[in-house]
Amino acid sequence: MKHSFKFFALLFCLYGASSFVQAQRQPAIGEDISQCKSRFEAVYTSPSGSSARLVAVNSLLKFNEYPACLARLIIKSQPMERAAFADFVKFLEAHRMDKQEGATTGSGGSTNLVSKGIAAQILSLAAEYGALTESVNNQVVTVQGSLDGIPMALLRQDLLQYCPKGNPTVEEICVHRTLVNWLRRISYGVSFDISRNSQSVAGTPTGTQQGNTQQVTFTPDQHQVSSVVGRLVLWSTRDATSDSFQKQWRSALIANGAGANTSSPSPAFIDSAAGNLLKAGKALLDDVGTTFTESQSLHDALNAAPDQISVDTLVGNAISDQLKSDAKLVQNAGSFLQSLDKFVAEEDAFVTALAEKPVLTLEYNNNRPVGQSPVSTFRLIFDKGFTKEWSLTANGAVAMNDENPPATVPGASRLRDAQFGFQLQHNFSSFIFSSPAALSGSYYFQYQNSPAILNVTPGTPLPGITITGLSPNATQIFSQKGNLHIGQIKLMLGVGQSTMRIPLAVSYSNRTELINKPLWRGQIGITYDFDSFLGGK
Amino acid sequence: MVTDCKLIPSPEDPVCSFKAKTGPVTLKVDGTIGSVMIIKAEYDGKAIPNLPSSQIQFTVVAGRKNLDVVYVFSDPENGAGVLSEVCTPGGPLASVTADNPMVRYIICA
């Protein structure tokens, strides 16, 4: 029994020792850092002293031809400080959500478009760092973006690292490619009706009238936010390999803004990131110079190195010696890796914008029209391109009143309406003045289950609506319900090489929600993409 | 007009990427996995214009000069390509990969 115990104890110790040895084995540089792999393996596998070894060593030490490997070797030798996290905390503190800069709307001389509440602060920050697009349609300003805009904006400000393969080589906060792709599926939008930027106030008498004076309680009626939208892409297609995609990628990269059609992404960020990568690469390689390539002793030692460990040790020692004599080397290597990560992130974003097309999207829209109770609409959107030029969009929706309508309104219910629409679009790569354009025809049908109900404050007119003969005590009015049929022809024009777009549209409807008469309408707007204005640092 | 080749890879040289004759040179990059283009390039510290493109043109001068290039890939994860000179008979000069988009070639003329 005693001998059996000793035997098993010995076995356990041997197993533990082998595990300890395995745990201590450092991976070869070629295994550990993918950018170094092929050149290091060529040295590992060539016999020492051979002509093949000579060529392999020459190739290995030409770090100028693969600076990504050199930078990772330098950082591996001396990890960077966690400067990024500290900077991230400072960034959040400097942009606390309870702060407001500048005058509020309604103040004399204010230049703010809207009051800076929390939402506007986030949106304006997002817009500032290129995470949003802004469009002006009639007098409605819409800012919208997708959730991937937030990590991308932080990445562009050097507050996050991008790790496409999920293996950060430095101790920093890192965002993975898969996470960014998932966040890209969720988008949001907020619309502000700038025609309603003056606050209206309603007063209600309270207390007892004293002679000619009367106490009044004032309540604001501000509806600047006209709608809030959230979208989730349920199903998308991705083509990043076909010849058609390759051609589109090349065209979009060269076109410098306008792209092959109105939906191509702007290459502004990728171009800026490439410029920064070039600058950082030059700084690193100028710093290193010919230290390794012109070191005869290092060449000789590597030519004679008998095994992989010797090769790695010689290279590691050479880099450590360089680090001791050059204080800037770590900083240059770190800057290069940051620039490299940002460049890869922009490459990914550019490809995804071209390659991924949402096919089925779920949308929630909370619409807050003037004088009406808010309405929540749940919409399913189908969008498919069939050729490079043609695409079909169809959607169906159900709209619900957020509040129970009064029982006094006949036919009113929480279910407000059901909608169906479709659009056929044709893209032109070149139209008037050689700018890209798109022509679309749309049809929209709405089944009104509940009539449109307007809230009226006695004595206070609704913007754009004049009601005569209304009882002074009326607080709610409702229209005659009926089905809506609307047809629209729209031309979306590109403007030269910019990302500005001008939509021009004409529509015909048999009625509106309030007016039971046919109506012709024209619409014009401007959309522009901040990406091209904010092309990174 | 296709010209005689001016650049030759020099693996036996410890410093130079290519040995070269002076004069105008056209380089091109072809994708072997996805598409590859040159988005930024400088020769001897001077920016090469008309980028992005799959080709660049510059004039090789005497001495040891740097050609700094940034490649862009349609497959940022696995993209690869080959850099070659537009000449007769032609032939590959260097391979390029998406995990190493910035490269400095040392051209010795």
Image (cartoon, coloured by chain):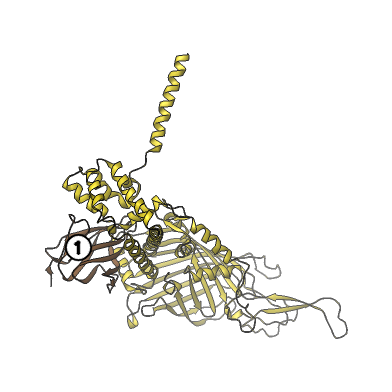
What number of labels is visible?
1
Q: Position of residue B88 (x, y in %)?
A: 11, 65
Q: Position of residue B17 (x, y in %)?
A: 21, 60
In this rendering, position of residue A425 left or right of residue A93: left
Q: In terms of depth relative to the viewer, which is nearer, A24 or A128?
A: A24
Q: Is residue A521 visible?
A: yes
Q: Which chain is yellow?
A: A
Q: Are there few (<14), some (14-19), or many (20+) residues within 10 Å of tag 1? A: many
In this rendering, position of residue B8 left or right of residue A311: left
SS for callout 1: strand
Does A435 appear above or below A391? below
Q: Amino acid at mark 1?
A: Ser
Q: Quadrant of residue A442?
A: bottom left
Q: Is residue A449 visible?
A: no
**Chain for mark 1?**
B
Residue at x 23%, y 67% (from the top left corner):
B65
Which quadrant holds the N terminus of chain B?
bottom left
Q: Quadrant of residue B36?
A: bottom left
In this rendering, position of residue A517 left or right of residue A204: left
Residue at the disc numbered 1: B84
Which quadrant holds the C terminus of chain B?
bottom left
The extreme top residue here reads A1
In this rendering, position of residue A306 left or right of residue A145: left
Q: Position of residue A463 (x, y in %)?
A: 63, 82
Q: Quadrant of residue B13?
A: bottom left
Residue at x 37%, y 74% (from the top left corner):
A257
Does A410 appear above or below A334? below
> Which shade is chain B?
brown
Q: In terms of depth relative to the viewer, which is nearer, A165 or A438?
A: A165
Q: Position of residue A225 (x, y in %)?
A: 59, 72
